[in-house]
Amino acid sequence: MNQMKKYSNARATLAIAVASFRSIIRSPSAVVFSLAFPLIFIIVFANIGGSPVTVDVGVAKSCDTINPVYQILKKTGVVHLIKNQSASEMASNLSKGTIDVILDIKNNRGLNNHEKGWTIYPPLSALGGGKSPFTVNIQYTKASQQKDGIFRSLLNGILFQINSMGSTVEQPVAELKEATVQGREYKYIDFILPGMLGFSLLSSGVFGTAFVFLSLRLTLVIKRFFATPVKRYSIVVGEALARLVFSWIGALFIITVGHYFFGFTLVHGLITVVNMLILSAIGLIIFMGFGFIISGIAKNESSVPPLSNIITLPQFLLSGTFFATTAFPSWLQGLANILPLTYLNKAMRDVAFEGAGMGDVTHELLILGIWFIIVYAVAVKTFKWE
Amino acid sequence: MAKQPIITVKNLVKNYDDFAAVKGISFDVYDGEIFGLLGPNGAGKTTTLEIIETLRDKTSGEVTVDGLSIDHDADKIKQRIGVQLQAAGYYPNLNLSELIKLFCGLYGIDKTPSEMLGKVALNDKAKSKYKELSGGQKQRFSIATTLINNPKIIFLDEPTTGLDPQARRNLWDLIREIRDNGTTVVITTHYMDEAEELCDRVAFIDGGHVVGIDTPNHFIDQLVASGFERKKQVKLANLEDVFINLTGKEWREG
């Protein structure tokens, strides 16, 4: 018969890679974790990053809206004015903290009522002879003291400006000169996108690998493979190859969307992208090692998610995916500075934003290398073929 | 024609940690026959089969398959046999024709999916997933994957368990056809009517030992000659004949 042709391990490996890749792109969880989640996070955080804080200001029905204080507030962009709520609704929202302050500006002309609150000295004499034509009444809430502080200083600034315009012109005691250094603008997307990429690689590597190898083992797919001349390494390499190609497609998609829609910085353009893909491969291989360990330890498919979460959640939160690790207390920083994702994220950011090459992130690569050795030493011990 | 053994098993022993599953089994399988391994659950059938298939290590004994020893030539043996495992699944999310391509790659053989699926009459299911198939279709697909490398021997572990009478008959026809094309078939089953109908020779295994090897006919004749009689007089037909007569011989999909 015709079968005595030389057996090709490369062909068998490729056949497994093709089969695995087809299976991955048809599995909803892989697509959601690798593409949809990172994208949603990027969209959400990129938009939060764009306008840092807004103060929700309830405008009382009795509030005068044609005075200069109100007009300036309206233009600042920091203040979100809410006008469509009744007084009682507003009061209850204020106590809950969904509204940060209630604003009520009274026009005092002709009424002559000096109440508590700020008094405004009119910028123009045309406003009349009265000493303080407007009173600004503010109600704050304990439920949102931080925003109240922002609003208070904002209002102080506005009132100081308006009041000093009204008084006779004097020489200023001091003059403020401001200058901004010209440089590359570091946007939040430059921080969040490499973090999301790392997260996507982490979840695909850990969850995906653990699930696939456990289910192939439990459903005897691997055993059936062993009844063919295929080598064990072909199965591992084939699976890794498929996951790598899928992760690269996901990374390219995230980088493309980030670059063209959110202005993600790629210092050296295509070379930066290639460097990011190399880092992605390194990260994925290490994270797959965790997946191999879990697939060996897990008894059934329902024990995969908890085990995987033990690996992924701490890294997700502590490895500088959303916030710089420098914001943590020092004991937590110590923990963060052990995790592999921390170093992958650092290396990614250096490559993407600083324009570093592979040679500039050797420190990170070294620590990832140590992780590689540890993870695969454990994986070799725990992995089960059947 | 002199019968040539294609598989020889001599004094095969398999011990698990504290349990002896196979305790010195010997038998030959001849080239071109359908050979049945029969016996109760836990008798050691599947263990014996998996040792011959090179999927499991033996404790002691000798096994040769097509003249090759399982100790030294496991890879060569794998290229010459086809294996259907009891209750094995297939790679998830792939359709039948993609699965056939995968196995072609694993065996290093060039076959088209339609050629292989045609052999088991599943061409119209080429785009279906394995899990969407009926029980009989699943078994036929499994058999198709065992035939990809033009094997000299195929091993079928309880291929008809759970099938309805029509699907079972349909599978028997397929297995006979494979035998008639020159492939040796080793099969395990719990259904004695099936073994009687299908197998050229059978071996009974119990408690890790072979307790008898012969043709089904000879076994029955021997028992009758020893004075055995069924309590109830056998009628010319049985209930399965009634079932087939009433519901038709055609095998239904689904």
Image (cartoon, coloured by chain):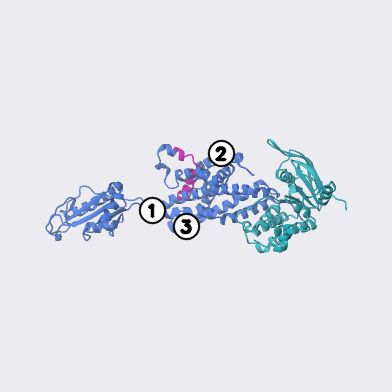
Whether labels 1 and 2 share one chain: yes
Reading the image, the residue beneath label 2 is A374
Which color has been applied to chain A in this rendered view?
blue
Quarter of the image that includes the C terminus of chain B:
bottom right
Q: Amino acid at mark 2?
A: Ile
The label shown at residue A257 is 3
Reading the image, the residue beneath label 1 is A48
Q: Secondary structure at mark 1?
A: helix
Report if the CB atoms under discs 1 and 2 are less than 8 Å apart. Answer: no
Residue B153 visible in the snapshot: no
The label shown at residue B55 is none
Direction left: furthest residue: A129
Whether labels 3 and 2 share one chain: yes
Segment tinted magenta in the rendering: A334-354
Which color has been applied to chain B in this rendered view?
cyan
**What is the chain letter for disc 3?**
A
Q: Looking at the magenta stretch, what is its main secondary structure?
A: helix
Does residue B30 appear to the left or right of A17 in the view shown? right
User: Where is residue B28 drawn, in percent x and y?
Assistant: 81, 46
